[in-house]
Amino acid sequence: MPSLIASHAMAASAIAPFWSVVIEVNIASASAGPWPVWTVRTDSEAGYNWGGRKGTSEPLNSLEQARRIAGLAEEKLAQDILILDMRPVCTYTDFFVLCSGQNARQTKAIYDEVRQGLKHGEDLLPFSVDGGAEGTWIVADYLDVVLHVFTPETREYYRLEELWEDVPSVELAI
């Protein structure tokens, strides 16, 4: 049985090497006897949407993603939200989203809201996150967009807006 499944998976990847394949196992199937039932489908057939908008296979572009992050932060009452267009000055990201919470507890809540909103709304998770334990400066790297959530004291100390003052800012809403 396993060699048959492997040949199905290999055949699927040979037909369309750019598709992701989802393998589902139904162990409780009465008609299969002692053997589990294996189903191989493409990710879109299985209803998965990796990094795209719900109901489409098209992912958010980096500006839409930055605005979505800013909107989610605003829902948790983030203050001084700013989107910086980093494309003219660096190659590792397109936008920075900067915002502040009143204290470490609120910065964590803001980050959690953004993470959950993108996870459930866009099927998107950060590549890496740092600062979540302390909560004074949380950095979430979504590759095209980097989210910075500060407490007011930490934001004043590091002054990223002054560091990147030559970078254009972007309107929050379209």
Image: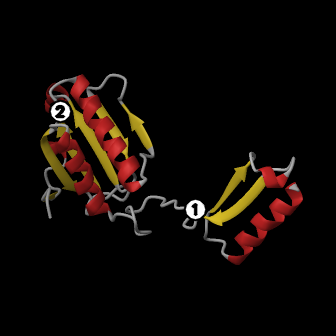
Q: Amino acid at mark 2?
A: Arg
Q: Amino acid at mark 1?
A: Ala
- Give the class, few, some or many, for how many residues have Cα within 10 Å of label 2's Cα (few <14, many ≥20): some
Q: Considering the numbered disc 2 on the image, is that residue within a helix, a strand or a loop?
A: helix
Residue at 83% x, 66% y: name it: 7
Please indicate, yes or no, whether residue 12 appears anywhere in the rendered image: yes
Quadrant for residue 155, please give it. Answer: top left
Quarter of the figure that contains the C terminus: bottom left
- Give the residue at mark 1: 46
The x, y position of residue 92, in whole percent, is 38, 55
Q: Considering the numbered disc 1 on the image, is that residue within a helix, a strand or a loop?
A: loop
Residue at 32% x, 22% y: name it: 134
In the picture provided, is 152 more to the left or to the right than 60?
left
Q: Which mark is residue 155?
A: 2
Figure label count:
2
- Disc with the residue nearer the chain's start (2 vs 1): 1
The x, y position of residue 172, in whole percent, is 14, 56
| Marks 2 and 1 in Cβ contact (< 8 Å) | no
Q: Can you say whether 81 is above or below 52 in the image?
A: above
The x, y position of residue 37, in whole percent, is 77, 55
Residue at 75% x, 50% y: name it: 29
Q: How is the image coloured?
A: secondary structure
Q: Which mark is residue 68?
A: none
Quadrant for residue 3, please give it. Answer: bottom right
Q: Can you say whether 4 is above or below 82 in the image?
A: below
The x, y position of residue 116, in whole percent, is 36, 42
Residue nearest the observer in this picture, 24 or 107: 24
Quadrant for residue 167, please give it. Answer: bottom left
In the picture provided, is 77 more to the left or to the right than 114?
left
Q: Residue furthest front?
A: 30
Q: Real-space Cα distance between discs 2 and 1? A: 44 Å
